[in-house]
Amino acid sequence: MEEKLLLLGDQAIALGAIHGGISGVYAYPGTPSTEITEYIQEHPLAKERNIYSKWCTNEKTAMEAALGMSYIGKRSIVCMKHVGMNVAADAFVNSTMTGTNGGLVVLVADDPSMHSSQNEQDSRFYGKFAFAPIFEPSSQQEAYDMVKFALEMSEEYKLPVLMRVTTRMAHSRSVIVASGTKGQNQISFPEDTSRWILLPVNARRRYLELLAIQPVLEEISYNSPFNRYQAGNKQGVIACGIGYNYLMENYPDGCDRTVLKISQYPLPKDLIRKMYEECNEILVLEDGQPFVEEQLRGLLDINGKICGRLTGEIPRVGELTPDNVREALGFPGVSAFDASPNVVGRPPALCAGCGHRDVYTVLNEVVREYKDSKVFSDIGCYTLGALPPFRAIDSCVDMGASITMAKGAADGGLFPSVAVIGDSTFTHSGMTGLLDAVNSNSSILVIISDNETTAMTGGQESAGTGHLESICLGLGVETDHLHVVIPLPKNIEEIKSLIRKEIEYNGVSVIIPRRDCIQAHKKAVKSKK
């Protein structure tokens, strides 16, 4: 059933997300993106479906929670303004490496002319940098249709999708026709869960896969219903997003120029080459920075004078070395930087005597008692718990993501949802995630594995040493559900009982297994001697 509505661009996006089957919207308020979340919070269908829509502590926690909801197969949208994308960038860039499960749209509202912002920024560069598909609507109707399309595309190709709007699109109104409502997804998990653990061995494979899918994304862009080539005279115009709207306003009786409308990226290169061959000049209309124009200057070097990583003379993957530079220059010579064939790879492992070992031993035994349990982890030496013999964690995305991803998964209905984070990573960027979880009373168990140092980077002082309990209490964790234990074999049964008890608690629980790092302990003893 079709319905005509007069909506802001932000509201059209919000309605498209609701009709597209999202189970959660995550955001930190920032003009001109704020109205998206507000519209979802007040919409009757969103309330009926119990779509999660509480505000987050910052854009990074919002991005991670949306990613956590995607991980369990449900659709989500995360909204921010352009400077908020700087805060979320760590999680966003790595999310294309992990990929998605449920559809995930990252909505960024740019503010050209700085109507309410401290700078001008073009978020399309983030999408290109991360190898993500990018959408840019030219009208409110397209914004509504596009977010539904983007959620489908994200789910099909297992990639987050960046959707970029500008202030005028976000805050101007137009009549849209709304139709077609999709139900919410059920919990499901990806077949390959290793891609969510960005250890180097997985990340290298995922990067190759991400590069390999780029030609497919370009073909989709070429055939996209949001990109359109209109033949005309020898004067060409490439109009991006709202630029197409402005172009057509100047041609009320129809445009006689050759026009390429671009609202989906990566750039449809074959259509651009076609325009280059058919036109004497090309005017690029884009709101923000010369994102497309700069690419055209390289794309239209059709004489093949430029070579490098894109043409294969320099490897696309890996670092620059004297060897591959020598080969690109055409100089003969023996490779000096290749690894010896006699050297056997030796993957890292948790140290013998490490307290993290006992934590994972206990945790593995308990979570196996639940059918759908997932353990979201983080960046630190404890990430090695992903490897044999433990295989104890299901994610490692960016600093501080474990708590917010566990929260997002719990918001989507996962039980139990467990987060494992180290003491140093917790104070780096995990505290805001815990605050989000407390404010929402999320049903998660957080394990802060405290070895009283920043072990992975050499044993530097950890900011939280001696303060973790106070920090947790200050963030609102209840005293009865904050526990400190000593991870030793003699205490395993006691710790197992405690974990079982706190998993069943309907709220935020924190357990701090505390035992000093074995390497730091050795250094301390040696120093005393």
Image (spheres, rainbow, N blue to C red):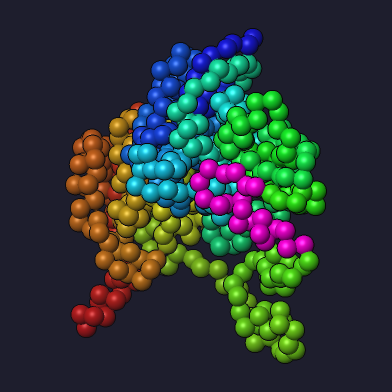
Front-most of residues 26 and 196: 26
Q: Is residue 109 visible?
A: yes
Residue 362 on the magenta segment: no
Q: Which residues are magenta?
A: 283-302
The N terminus lies in quadrant:
top right
- x 68%, y 34%: residue: 226
Q: Quadrant of residue 457?
A: bottom left
Residue 31's x, y, as percent? 38, 35
Residue 294 on the magenta segment: yes
- x 61%, y 53%: residue: 293
Residue 295's x, y, as percent? 64, 56
Q: Quadrant of residue 81?
A: top left
The C terminus lies in quadrant:
bottom left
Residue 439's x, y, as percent? 30, 32
As drawn, which residue projects farthest toward the bottom? 333
Residue 82's x, y, as percent? 43, 44
Q: Quadrant of residue 366?
A: top left
Horizontal arrangement in the rendering, residue 383 relative to residue 491 (left or right): right
Horizontal arrangement in the rendering, residue 313 relative to residue 178 (left or right): right
- x 42%, y 62%: residue: 381
Q: Is the residue 370 above or below the residue 294 in the image?
A: above
